[in-house]
Amino acid sequence: MDTIFAVSSGRPPAAIAVLRISGPAAIAAGTRLAGSLPRPRHAAVRTLRDEAEQPLDQVLVLLFPAPNTATGEDLVELHLHGGRAVVAAVEQALAQQPGLRPAEPGEFTRRALSNGRIDLVQAQGLADLLEAETEQQRRLAIESADGAVSRMIQQWMTDLAQIGALVEASLDFDDEDDVSPVDSKLIDRQVDALATALRQTLARPAVERYRDGIRVVLVGPPNAGKSSLLNALIGRDAAIVSPIAGTTRDRVEAGIVRRGRIYTLVDTAGLRDATDDPIEQIGIARAREAVAAADIILDLSDSVAADPRAIPVHAQADRRSSPSHAALATSIHDLSTIDNLWSAIERRADHVLGEPDGPTFNEAQRHTIAVALTALQKLKDTPDLLLRAEELRTASRALAGLLGLDATEAMLDALFGRFCVGK
């Protein structure tokens, strides 16, 4: 296997650049550059030199012998000064050594998976952690990356193994008259307990749901103040505002992060019953599509909002009389009213997408869990012991696949392509 190297910290220029060398020739490569390496897991200052004995940089060197390393291989870390020229010179010196090459994106983590240092769920969590944009996403990714989710899956597999032992015992002694049969009710109780755990997991929103956040759509008639209110809510001019009715002809979307949660606010064309303008008709149709996909609706009409997702809003409260129904008064000239509206939005968002009460999974993982759950349901519904054993194997294969035990090369390529070089 090749020995790989790459910068694992931020792209230069930076104060420090951490360059990793991993593989069977890592120790030899580090020794050629540094002259000698410190004892394992102890940092030491060394001067790196190229093949011509010209100094490259004075660095901090660390040695991590296999197998207890990030990749499961011999690993050397060089903490360089983070200038572009310094990093380029050291990389060039490494590339000239036989058996060494630059790492591909995600290759360090892929080797960690191949060498059993992490499982597929942890690798997925690390990918999510690298892409996390909010505090909520970071916490969810950490649960996967540090092994909490993997341990839960492993417990499910242990539970399946216990059920399997009972089913196999039933098969082995089914024809033995002098041996007491295994209590089928005991099997059913254990199946029910595991199935309940899987259902509870699937009842939580998917990871993608926390990544996409809350979709807030502003609706109302033309000139109701939707665009002005959207700009006030996000604190910048994203939508064009004018006194001309029908200025907004298409959806305008703007994102904002508040209290660790992503919101996408959508301004829509003014809604009215009929119009002869074909462009306005398209805008109204798209507005209705946006409403259909909304988590929260800010209803700026003067009618009572029947949709349970709606928050009635009395916009332009400084210029327009209050509607007959209860509505939250807002004015872009009074920021306290905008804060009040945000409070109402956040309260509603807590019901739509609150803090998860346990580990969460992405859509592909949820599909796999659903396969295992379906197998457990079929297992309980059939009295045939052979069919029970087959459904048990189906559930086991599905859960094992979550940990990467049956992961295909194509799936791994899709996953590790999300990583940066050096990770």
Image (cartoon, helix red, strand yellow):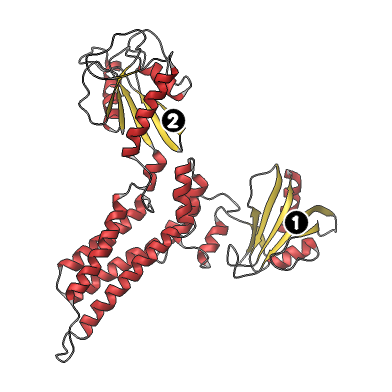
Q: Which of 185 and 271 is in front in this view?
A: 185
Q: Earlier in the sequence, mark 2 or mark 1?
A: 1
Q: Which residue lies most toward the bottom here?
A: 178
Which of 114/343 is in front? 343
Q: What is the quadrant of residue 83 in the picture?
A: top right
Residue 5 picture location, percent across and down = 65, 57
Q: To which residue does mark 1 refer?
A: 60
Q: Is residue 251 left or right of residue 130?
A: left
Q: Residues within 10 Å of mark 2 (few under 14, many from 20)?
A: some
Q: In this view, does 423 lie above or below 323?
A: below
Question: Which amino acid type is marked by label 2?
Answer: Gly
Quadrant assignment for the C terminus: bottom right
Measured in 3D between alpha carbons, the distance from the residue under mark 2 to the one under mark 1, in whole angstroms, is 42 Å
| Mark identifier at residue 255 | 2
Residue 120 lies, in percent from the top left, at: 45, 60
- 56 in relation to 113, above or below: above
Say few, some or many: other residues with alpha carbon within 10 Å of mark 1 (under 14 / 14 to 19 / 20 or more). many
Which residue does the image show at 49% across and 44% down from the upper left?
A: 132
Q: Say whether marks 2 and 1 touch (CB < 8 Å).
A: no
Identity, as a three-letter code, of the amino acid under mark 1: Leu
